[in-house]
Image (cartoon, coloured by chain):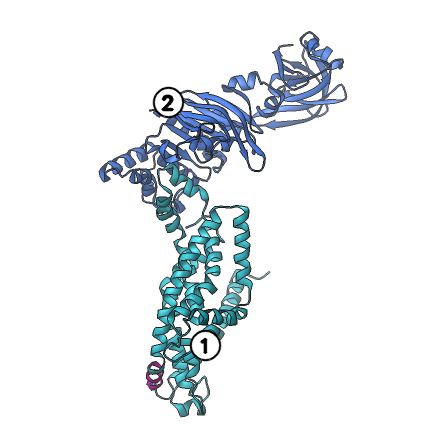
Amino acid sequence: MAAGIIIDDVTKVFPPNVVALKNVSLKIKPGEFFVVLGPSGSGKTTLLRIIAGLEVPTKGRVIIGDEVVVDANEGIYVEPRDRNIGMVFQNWALYPHMTAYDNIAFPLRIKKLPKDEIDKRVREVAEALEISDLLYRKPAHMSGGQQQRVAVARALVKQPNVLLLDEPFSNLDARIRITAREFVRELQKNLGITTILVTHDQADAFAVGDRIMILKSGIAQQIGPPEELYGKPANVFIAGFIGDPPMNLFKLKIDHPLIDTLNVKGYITKHGNIVYVGIRPDEAIASTSLENAHFIGKVILVEYVGSRRYAKVNILNEISMRVLAEENIRDGDEVRIYVKKLHLFNSNGKRICTINP
Amino acid sequence: MISFKTKMIIAYTVLVLLTFFWMLPFYVALVTSLKSHEETYTTNVLQPPSAANIIPWFIAWSRVSRAFINSILVSIPATFLCVLAGTLAGYYLSRFVSKVNRLLFFLIAIATFIPYQILLIPMTMFLSTVGIMGTHLSFIITYTILLSPWATLISAAFFLAIPKELEEAAQIDGASPVQSFFKIVLPVALPGIISTTIIIFMSIWNEFLFAVTLSTSPIIRTIQPEVANLRGTTTVAWNTLMAGSLIAILPPLVITLALGKYFIRGLLAGALKGVR
């Protein structure tokens, strides 16, 4: 049965005084695919390990289904083996001396299930993960993608309430990665199992997540579906972190000419003298022939990011930003720039609003 | 630019030469052990015997057989104790990192660097005070004390090469710490443990200084000092001495040939990524 998870005010301090997580609270619905996204050292793996029971929080509690699995204040701690979770480690942690079959059967053998029941379930899960023909190979004789599937099969074979994935795609090369993401996503949807995935790669997060939590220095920054994180970033950190190529962010005084040009003074007067203005490269366009452009700039260079073409332009002789480029634009051109959407943040980096200038 | 073929020819020439020089003493020992007493003095050491003469082997065996058995009675328990203590300590020190453990590790490393000759007199004084000089037990205790730090260091290196995620995965898969140790850690570490066993066994078997000192009577004497005694008193009986030496290297040789596969895998385990 898929179970919901409640993380209640969890703090983790590693001795002497490294704060890995600070007052993190969140609720994961049964059957949800939840992603924890953050740069390295943000505490995301620690959070996953606390849910698994491999670490104990310094403060707070974790509830899986309707069972409190850990409560630092009450001194409750349920061993990982009693939590009925499946976990896939970053390096997959397959047992090197066992074949794929024995790896997958291991959790069931520990439970002392009857032999034919074990065999039936191993073959079922192997079928679902399309690894039936690898069952008698050892991990050393499998590709990265195959090892990953065996690791997922081992995590799923005991029909856990929760599936935990720690950077499952980071050891795969770019091409397999895309299929692996689709595969994990489909599998999760078919099984309806509550899943938490931890990653530093926003492409992973956006590809699979129903909801995403952004973690920075152990503090939850924003929790929401991908479109919300992209469309309404809660602060400057998220604005800069999410999106590829990254958002153009400017820290401007309120009397800066750009504020006038963009006509946003009305939104920010009560937020002090300094604001952050963010413009996504995809939400502004440089052209030689726009009627209603916001400002004029000079193209420094034109580049491809993914399949799109961007121009790095210099405006007002002091600010440079990256915007979508029309096809005919070349280095050194004078261009007119139109901004479709911009994001405003106060001097503390907190979101004010998103507007269409 | 040297071609691949030339490189291979050079490499093999060097290897063959090295093997030749390494095998030469063994060859000399073998042919000498099959020569008659006169022949050992009249012929060149490299020259094969005119007729194979196995009498020196019988003489040597009759003189070293008791010491041979003594050595087995001492080496096997001492190796077992060293490997047992070493793997347990090595596992603990490699898995539970703390300030105290780091200090312990450091002290154990230092213990292995002390020239062991220094311990000769204190150790014999200790053994005679306890009153077990001249027993098999004195050898077993001495070798366990001398070599368990080595066993700890070597096996800690092997355990360090096993990713801790393997044990965490076993934990999540439902295994208790004991199950996880016996079903996952031990089988994965087995090549390492076997290598440790071979190294420790050979060190004990080949040890000479303590063996001479602790062999207070012929009844208790072990193989290395007994082989040294084969030399004879007036003239050196080279053929018997060589036959005795060859008998003395048999156990380490047999063990290495039987377990060599694991030995090499174990030695490589720390060097290569991923444990096979």
* Foreground pick, A265 / B113: B113
Residue A86 got which mark? none
Residue A313 lies in what quarter of the image? Answer: top right
- Residue B160 makes an appearance in the image: no
Q: Amino acid at mark 1?
A: Val
* Foreground pick, A74 / B11: A74
Please give left or right for residue A322 compared with residue B28 in the image. right
Colour used to depict chain A in the structure image: blue
Dominant secondary-structure state across the stretch colored magenta: helix
Q: Position of residue A76 (x, y in %)?
A: 42, 30
Q: Residue at x 42, y 25 (%)?
A: A63
Look at the image and say whether residue B55 sits in the magenta stretch. Answer: yes
Q: Is residue A340 above or below residue B76?
A: above
Q: Which residues are magenta?
A: B54-61
The residue pinned by badge 1 equals B212
Q: Position of residue B115 (x, y in %)?
A: 55, 67
Please give left or right for residue A257 compared with residue A224 in the image. right
Which chain is represented by cyan in the image? B
Q: How many marks?
A: 2
- Number of residues whose C-alpha sits closer than 10 Å to that of mark 2, classed few (under 14), some (14–19) or many (20 or more): few
Is circle 1 on the same chain as circle 2?
Answer: no
Q: What chain does mark 1 sit on?
A: B
Q: Residue at x 44, y 51 (%)?
A: B91
Q: Amino acid at mark 2?
A: Asp
- Number of residues whose C-alpha sits closer than 10 Å to that of mark 1, classed few (under 14), some (14–19) or many (20 or more): some
Look at the image and say whether residue A193 sits in the magenta stretch. Answer: no
Q: What chain does mark 2 sit on?
A: A
The residue pinned by badge 2 equals A66
* Foreground pick, A52 / A243: A52
Location of the N terminus of chain B by quadrant is: bottom right
Query: Circle 2 sits in a helix, a strand or a loop, which is it?
Result: loop
User: Is mark 1 in CB contact (under 8 Å) with mark 2?
Assistant: no
